[in-house]
Structure formats: C-alpha cells, structure tokens
Amino acid sequence: MYKKLMTALAGLTLSGAVLAAAPQVELKTTMGDIVLELDHDKAPKSVDNFLAYVKSGYYKNTIFHRVIDGFMIQGGGYDEKLKGKPTNKPIPLEANNGLHNVKYSLAMARMGDPNSATSQWFINVEDNAGLDAPGPDGSGGYAVFGKVIKGQETVDKIKAVLVDDKGMFQNLPVVPVTVKSATILKTPIQPKQ
C-alpha cells in the first residue's frame, strides 16, 4: 500500500511540473508597473526570444518610443537618447498561433519582412484585428505572445501621454516613459478576473 501511495504521489508531482505556470515578466516603468503573462505553448519562439532579452537586462532603461492612443504602445529598442541597441538575430513569425491582437495583448514588433522581429514589442491598447494573421496586406500579421495581467492602468496612462515627432521617430512621448527594469517573477501572480 505504501509503495502504491508513493508511486501515485510521484506521478502527481511530475504532472504538476508539466502544468507549471506560464512565465510572467514585470516591467517597472516611470509611470507604474506592468505584469505580462507569456504564452509559451502558442508562441514558443517569441517567448524564448523575449525572455532571453529580459534575462540579459537588455530592456533596462529602454523607452516607449512609439505611443498611439487608440492603437498601441511600443518599446524594446531605444534608450532615452534615442540610440538603438544591438539586437539578436530575428525570429520567425508566429502570428498564426490562435492568439489575437486584442486590448492589453503583447505582440512582437517587426519590419516589413514578416520574419524580422528582434527585441521590440508592443501592447495593444484597443482590439486590433487588422494586425492578426494573415493580415490585410498579406504580410502575415503580428505575433501575439502574451498579455497584460496586472497594470492595465499603467498601460492606460502611457497611451495618454503627449507625443510629438522627432527626426525618424513619430508619436514619441515628449517626456520619456522609461522601462527601469524587466524581471521574470519567481512567484507568479494570479491574473485579475
């Protein structure tokens, strides 16, 4: 009986390991904190890519360099002096994964080439079905790989900042909104229902 009980407990422990919580990342910004929950099952390459940048400290002191109320807020590539940071190799597009560009979802930013996403990401501040795969321009859409589970009020504050154009930057916050740190939460939080 003891042996059967121990075998059953070991099986439960292993199944619990398989059902580990989705990775969560906290962005501490100059306007408040945002907690992101990442969907590794549906967007493994995008999540692994994002987590590699987080673990390296890459996002520390980067800014939200493109803010469009009614659309999205974008960050992950520039410092306060608008200097671009070196990136890792681009990743393949994972837009056709069943996740949608809905309000508070997190997606990879990219250039015209669908497989050009590197360090930059954006948070949708409205439902943006036009960014979903396959995309109206045939480009393949934009890969959603997570969502905001805490700090929606911070996202709402950021989307409402005063913006202007400066050089090649359009919709740049006049007062920089900076990511002070990005860290993986060791103890995941429960999303608000």
Image (cartoon, rainbow, N blue to C red):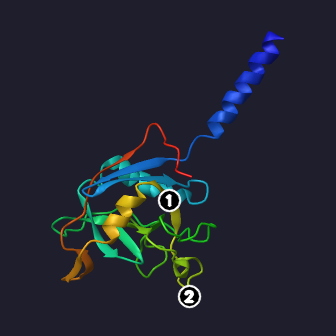
Q: Relative to 114, is 122 on the left or the right?
A: left
- Callout 2, which amino acid? Pro
- Label 1 secondary element: strand
Asked whether residue 88 is in view, the answer is: no
Which residue lies under the disc numbered 2? 136
Does residue 2 sit above or below 193 in this rendering? above
Q: Residue at x 49, y 56 (%)?
A: 47
Label 2: how many residues lie within 10 Å, few (<14), some (14-19) or many (20+)? Answer: few
Q: Which of 43 and 106 lies nearest the eye of the viewer?
A: 106
Q: Is residue 186 visible?
A: yes
Residue depicted at x 35% and y 69%: 74
Q: Residue 134, how many percent across, how many down?
A: 60, 80
The mark tally for this picture is: 2
Which residue appears farthest toward the bottom when viewing the image?
A: 137
Query: Could you tell me the amino acid type at mark 1?
Result: Lys
Residue underneath mark 1: 147
Q: Taking 20 as reference, is 52 left or right?
A: left
**Mark 1 or mark 2: whose residue is earlier in sequence:** 2
Please tell me whether residue 104 is drawn above or below residue 37 in the rendered image.
Answer: below
Image coordinates of residue 49 in percent, x first then y, are: 44, 57
Q: Is residue 80 above or below residue 110?
A: above
Image marks 1 and 2: residues in contact by CB distance under 8 Å: no
Nearest-to-viewer mark from 1 and 2: 1
Q: Quadrant of the N terminus?
A: top right
**Nearest the eye: 159 or 22:** 159
Crowd rating for badge 1 (residues with CA inside 10 Å; few <14, some 14–19, many 20+): many
Where residue 59 appears, x then y in whole percent? 30, 56
- Residue appearing at x 27%, y 71% in the figure: 161
